[in-house]
Image: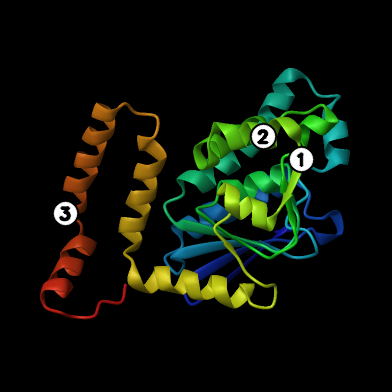
Amino acid sequence: MKFVEVEIKERVGYIILNRPDKRNALNADFVGELKAAFQSAEKNNAIKVIVLKANGEAFCAGADLGYLKSLQENSFEENLADSNNLMELFKLIYFLKKIVIAQVEGHAIAGGCGLATVCDFVYAVPDIKFGYTEVRIGFIPAIVSLFILRKIGETRAKELLLSGDLIDSLVAERYGLINKISPAIEIDEKVFIFAKRLCEQNSGQSMGSTKDLIAKVQHLNIKEGLDLAANKNAKSRETEDCKSGISAFLNKEKLTW
């Protein structure tokens, strides 16, 4: 692929944004390659946990402004197709059966911040900026709005989406936008150790099912949510992972997944 690199290290799959000369700004081809990379990683049995990171100084500067300018000549139907392309990427990551960790070592702005937002965990270095700046150029942070509302709530989401302000890593952590801050010299190791811990200590099937439950249960009423939870609970008991885990626990055996 032209804009994306993929590496595998001990069941941790790395999907790497690789357009550093453009601050990893997104265009249709870039989004398409990312979709293909995540779909491939989801099917790859050699990968249990995925890390999304970037080459260059920026994690992702959002949409390529030159590309956005060219879209102004499009029809509504053409722009809708392009919007759906990005929507499909965010949806794919959010509902992916495998855990996705964003490793953010440079500014994550607009669509780039959206990419981090839809990941399950976010590790970031200090002194970088996060923000959804679309309103500053007459655009709107439409697709990410659904995910950021779920992640940090309406008050904080309105503050970020309507102001277009940038926040630093410390504020992003306080708002719940990111999980951990790590010094740049340590972040590679810390993310890898965390990803390896998920690989070794947790059932991949259980993590995937729990992630799916979290994604689906939030829009249900209490009865529908409990019914879904009970159904997933019952189904999980039939899995080989559950049988192996309970057997190991009862027999006081160490289980490495």
Q: Residues within 10 Å of mark 1 (few under 14, many from 20)?
A: some
Along the horizontal axis of the image, is 253 left or right of 35? Answer: left
Q: What is the spatial separation of the Cα atoms under label 1 and label 3, in whole angstroms?
A: 47 Å
Quadrant of residue 56 within the rendered picture: bottom right
Give the percent coordinates (x, y) of residue 198.
41, 68
Residue at coordinates 77% horizontally, 54% vertically from top-left? 24
Q: Nearer the viewer, residue 152 or 203?
A: 152
**Whether residue 173 can be seen here:** yes
Quadrant of residue 218 within the rendered picture: top left
Residue at label 1? Answer: 165
Q: Earlier in the sequence, mark 3 or mark 2?
A: 2
| Amino acid on which the number 2 mark rests in the picture | Glu
Q: What is the spatial separation of the Cα atoms under label 3 and label 2, in whole angstroms?
A: 43 Å
Along the horizontal axis of the image, is 55 left or right of 41? Answer: right
* 113 to 21, vertically: above or below: above
Give the percent coordinates (x, y) of residue 215.
41, 41
Quadrant of residue 107 within the rendered picture: bottom right
Give the percent coordinates (x, y) of residue 143.
62, 33
Residue furthest to the bottom in view is 253
Q: Nearer the viewer, residue 43 or 159?
A: 159
Residue at label 3? Answer: 237
